[in-house]
Image: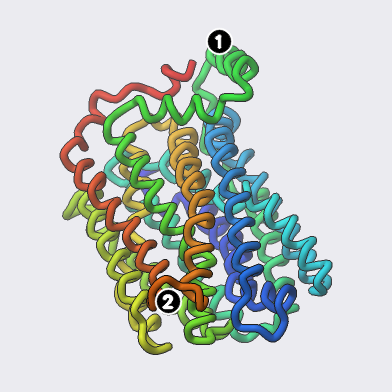
């Protein structure tokens, strides 16, 4: 149970599904621009459409993650993991068939709907699955390995995409997502046994039926009431998600407008970035976790994230983002696994789904806010309407979100021992 190798089938499923999702990322900016604003380097409509999509997916994830995490505690991780992996297939199939403007909008709608579950659902349930199999001492390594496998998938997908045409990219994505579903159906075992008796399930069912409209918010509130550490982790998740949402679309459009980056440039940048992230998550974090606490790792990672965006915001040449990507993301990408490990230690083994689901739900709430802040800000400072000459000002603001998150991360170190007197989420919920 304690060996990370026991999670090999989970790792394969995570790799294939993340490969399918990430292989389209370098190309989607160019595809969006070509469909909406052909032959243009700047397009406000493309920025706002991407921001709107991100906000809708964030809203859906915020509502669904606590629920799907809770259900995975009761009905098993594999059963619930099947849903987002299956939904991942459909958007790529549309674009693999045809890439005209009408089909792009069909893809846009399908991607928005399925992304509510597939984007964060796979990661959320996979982390809960890994936490189930590990003791508290080894959870940081297990969670970091899951994250590292996802980063490795990103790395491989961005290497492969350089040799594929646009049509082939979506075909490969469709094949990989289908393979992930087939593999997990055949080999992944459900490691959750229903430890709740019929009475507890009946109480839970009654609770959900009586409070169906407020279930998500009720679960999040109950999670926050369990300990000071969880409350602080929630603040960090909001600030982290706020910045993370800013680099999903606005950062890419900033690079395109500022340095005329295209699909190949994005691919190279992501190869550099996720190469370091894969190394740090698979090798560095498991070793660091034996020496220093996750709280310290979290604070250092957030400092690295701020430094990354500060330099990008004042980048004076097209090569600067490449150098920055080689230095800072290696450490910044340790933030999320460290935070997830901290949260996993606040709850019991049969509460990992709801705990991680609420954490992802809160992060998704920040992703709703992020496009409304950074998309207009990016558009403003890239235009002639900018109040002062600082095209990368929105990138600096992204970094400031992570800088502010250092405060609650340091407070976790002060209150980190509160989990010994924690309440059980299930007891509060039921």
Mark found first going from the N terminus, 2 or 1? 1
Q: Secondary structure at mark 1?
A: helix
Q: Nearer the viewer, residue 355 or 373?
A: 373
Q: Which residue is mark 2?
A: 391
Picture coordinates of residue 244, whole percent (x, y): 44, 59
Q: Classify 10 Å Cα crowding around label 2: few (below 14), some (14-19), many (20 and above).
A: many
Residue 201 shown left or right of residue 307 in the figure: right
146 to 176, vertically: above or below? above
Residue 83 position by quadrant:
top right
Mark on residue 273?
A: none
Q: Is residue 34 left or right of residue 264?
A: right
Q: Is residue 409 visible in the rendered structure shown here? A: yes
- Residue name at image x 74 percent, y 72 percent: 171
* Residue to which mark 1 is pinned: 199
User: Percent x, y for residue 50?
Assistant: 62, 63
Foreground: 110 or 47? 47
Q: What residue sits 65% from the left and 83% below the top?
A: 40
> As rendered, which of 403 and 199 lies closer to the eye?
403
Judged by depth in the image, the label closer to the viewer, 2 or 1, is 2
Relative to 340, residue 328 above or below: below
Residue 278 seen by the camera: no
- Work out whether residue 270 or residue 122 is closer to the camera in this orientation and state it: 270
C-alpha gap between disc 2 and disc 1:
60 Å
Horizontally, residue 54 falls left or right of residue 112, namely left
| Quarter where residue 403 is shown | bottom left
Q: Position of residue 138 (x, y in %)?
A: 31, 46
Placement of the N terminus among the 4 image quadrants = top left
């Amino acid at each position: 149970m304690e060996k990370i190798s026991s999670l090999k089938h989970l790792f394969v499923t995570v790799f294939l599904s993340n490969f399918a999702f990430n292989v389209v990322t370098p190309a989607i900016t160019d595809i969006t621009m070509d469909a909406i604003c052909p032959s243009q380097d700047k397009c406000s409509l493309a920025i706002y459409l991407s921001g709107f999509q991100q906000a809708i997916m964030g809203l859906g994830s915020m509502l669904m993650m606590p629920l799907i995490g809770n259900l995975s505690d009761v009905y098993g991780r594999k059963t619930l993991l099947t849903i987002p992996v299956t939904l991942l297939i459909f958007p790529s199939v549309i674009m693999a068939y045809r890439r005209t403007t009408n089909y792009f909008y069909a893809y846009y709608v399908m991607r928005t709907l399925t992304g509510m579950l597939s984007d964060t659902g796979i990661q959320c349930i996979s982390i809960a699955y890994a936490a189930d199999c590990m003791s508290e001492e080894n959870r940081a390594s297990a969670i970091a390995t899951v994250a590292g496998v996802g980063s490795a998938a990103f790395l491989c997908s961005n290497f492969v995409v350089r040799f594929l045409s646009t049509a082939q990219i979506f075909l490969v994505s469709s094949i990989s997502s289908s393979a992930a579903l087939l593999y997990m159906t055949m080999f992944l075992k459900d490691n959750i046994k229903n430890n709740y008796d019929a009475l507890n399930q009946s109480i839970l069912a009654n609770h959900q039926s009586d409070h169906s409209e407020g279930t998500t918010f009720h679960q999040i509130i109950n999670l926050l009431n369990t300990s000071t550490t969880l409350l602080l982790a929630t603040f960090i998740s909001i600030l982290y998600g706020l910045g993370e949402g800013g680099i999903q679309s606005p950062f890419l459009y900033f690079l395109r407008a500022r340095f005329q980056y295209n699909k190949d440039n994005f691919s190279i940048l992501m190869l550099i970035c996720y190469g370091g992230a894969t190394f740090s998550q698979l090798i560095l974090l498991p070793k660091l976790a034996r020496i220093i606490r996750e709280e310290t790792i979290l604070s250092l990672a957030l400092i690295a994230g701020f430094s990354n965006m500060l330099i990008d915001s004042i980048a004076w040449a097209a090569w600067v983002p490449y150098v920055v990507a080689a230095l800072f993301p290696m450490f910044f990408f340790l933030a999320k696994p460290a935070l997830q490990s901290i949260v996993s230690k606040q709850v019991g083994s049969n509460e990992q789904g709801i705990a991680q689901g609420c954490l992802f739900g809160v992060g998704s709430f920040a992703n709703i806010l992020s496009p409304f802040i950074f998309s207009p800000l990016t558009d403003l400072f890239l235009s002639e309407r900018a109040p002062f000459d600082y095209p990368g000002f929105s990138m600096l603001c992204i970094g400031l979100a992570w800088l502010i998150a250092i405060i609650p991360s340091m407070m976790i170190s002060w209150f980190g021992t509160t989990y010994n007197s924690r309440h059980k989420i299930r007891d509060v919920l039921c």
